[in-house]
Each structure stands twice: as C-alpha cells, then as structure tokens.
Image: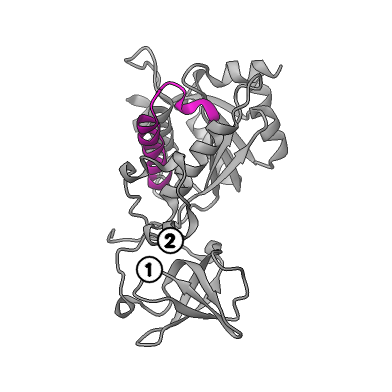
Amino acid sequence: MPKESPSRQRRKLSVAIPASIVSDVPHLREKTSKIGFIGRALAIFRVDEIVVYQDQPSRDQKREIQLIATLLSYLETPQYLRRHLFRIMPELRYAGTLPPLRTLHHPVRNRVSDLRTGEYREGVITCIHQQAADVDIGVEKPIPVLGLRLPVNTRVTVKITRTGKHPEAILADRYEIETYWGYEVTTSERTFGEMLRDRSFNLVIATSRRGRDFAEIISELKQRWEKSQRILVAFGAPTQGLYEIAEQEGAELESIADYVINTIPKQGTETVRTEEAIYATLSILNVFEESHFATENQALYITR
C-alpha cells in the first residue's frame, strides 16, 4: 500500500475508447492482455469513468463492446467479489492473466481483526434479514449492515462503524470517499459524435497526431481544465483516428471537441498504439491535477 493514499481527482475524468480497440489482435488471450494494460492505465491515473463507444456504424459492434466492458469491469472488481458478480462466460476465459489493480478498494487484508473503524470496503449482499443485510466484504464472514434493503448479489460500498468480534457497517456513497476508489464502465452503442451530444462534458479533449502540439497550448488548456468539472479525453482506433471516425458520421472533429491535441509530437515510430497513447496522454494531463504545477514547470516542458 502506498505511504500516502492517492486522492480522488478534483473533477470527474472520463476516457472514451472505441469498440474496435482490440481489432488489431486476433486471439482472445492477446485481447485480454491489451484490455488489462488499459485498465491499469485508468487506475494509475485515477480515471473515474471509461466510456466504450461505437466507431464503425456500418457494422454491429455489440460483441466487441461486451468483451471490453466485461473485462474492464472484472478487473475493477475486488477479487473476493468476482465469484458473486460474474458467471462463467467465454469473455473471461483468460481473465486469470489480468494484472491486479492494487488500488485501495482492492484490500489485501482479509481478516475481521484487520478491520478499522471508518474504513470503507466494497461488498456484495449475501443475505437479507428483517433489520439488516449480510454483506461479504472480503473477510472470514459476512458482516451485518443495518437498514440495508437491497437485493441479494447487489454490489455496495460500506463504511465500518464497529470492529471487534461482531463488526458492523453502514451503507456509504463511494463519492464521499476522498481517496481514489476505482473507475466505472459505461457503454454506448451510439457513434462518437452522438455520444458527445448525449453527455454533458465541460471539456472534450480529442487526441490525434494531426492535432496541435500539447506544448503550444499548455497554458490555455490548463485554464480550461481548472474551470471544468466533467472532462472527457477521447482516443481513436488502431485502424483509424478520431478525424476519420468523426468524418464517418459527417462531422468535423474540431466542431465536436474543444481541443484536438498531439501528446506525442515527433514520434519515433510510424504508428502509436491506442494503449500507448492512453499512457502518454494521461501522464501528461496528470500534471494539471498537481497543485505544485507552476509556470516554471511549463517552461521546462516547452524547452524540452
């Protein structure tokens, strides 16, 4: 566990990826590995939401969307809850190869004696009683949560209110937790442009090698970032970028995104894979969340 708990982003950060993001790898094992790589990036950079959108309107992409969403959701779910929430399904054939997230909502402490008052845990309702529900939170036995009247197998976030031999907890809102608590997965069978029109983002950043160099607009983009509460960072597919994806639906990328940026200027390879672009982009944008990010740091980046 890190010495200092990672705080939640000060604004909601969403990332959009296309359904065909794994179209360049033929085998389910490699697709699983690629999605695991992406899931780790989301957790490392404290992304709140991943949106999987349809990027090829001419064909049915429901299976691709289902695969990506299932694997990302499985990866985000604490290990002790997976047997409750996921049945045996072909998409999870190689799920055992997924890397662990090691986020704070994936605790390694698994004994009742390890629980601390005020601690948050993810759980699943296993049984309902008249005054409470039993919730599996990853220790030797389910613990009672008073006043909880939700269906069995519902995933919940709880807060420990009593420890010892007979611990208790109350239902909690994951958004009241000040530390990073994982991402949620959203799917959209609508096109990229339609998805943007359906959602109310304050700032939409599209990534493309044809976009403006990040260093040229760093100050302007930082100001917009700090004024926004809901931000979306969008990525293209292995076979076509966001310009081409937007053109398919008769739209211009600059008209549906606030900024189109190139976060890997003068790239040394002919192509940059989407998962590589996700790491590069989120690592750069992450500086906007750091309070010590100052003008001299901007100048240092630009001179490089």
Q: Residues within 10 Å of mark 2 (few under 14, many from 20)?
A: some
**Quarter of the figure with residue 294:** top left
Q: How many labels does the image show?
A: 2
The answer to which of 245 and 7 lies nearer the viewer is 245
Give the farthest residue toward the top. Answer: 270
Q: Which residue is drawn at 31% across and 42% down?
A: 97
Dot 2 falls on a residue whose secondary structure is helix
Where's the C terminus, which quadrant?
Answer: top left
**Quarter of the figure with residue 45:** top left
Classified by dominant secondary structure, the portion drawn in magenta counts as: helix
Dot 1 falls on a residue whose secondary structure is loop
Residue type highlighted by circle 1 = Gly
The answer to which of 173 and 86 lies nearer the viewer is 86
Q: What stretch is highlighted in magenta?
A: 17-44
In the displayed structure, 231 sits above or below 252; it is below
**In magenta segment, residue 41:** yes
Would you name the residue on which mark 2 appears? 81
Q: Which residue is drawn at 59% across and 15% down?
A: 244
Q: Which residue is drawn at 37% across and 43% down?
A: 95
Residue type highlighted by circle 2 = Leu
Which circle's residue, 1 or 2, is located before the other in the chain? 2
Would you name the residue on which mark 1 appears? 138
Rendered image: mark on residue 85: none
Whole-percent x, y for residue 281 in the image:
43, 32
**Tag 1 and tag 2, C-beta contact below 8 Å:** yes
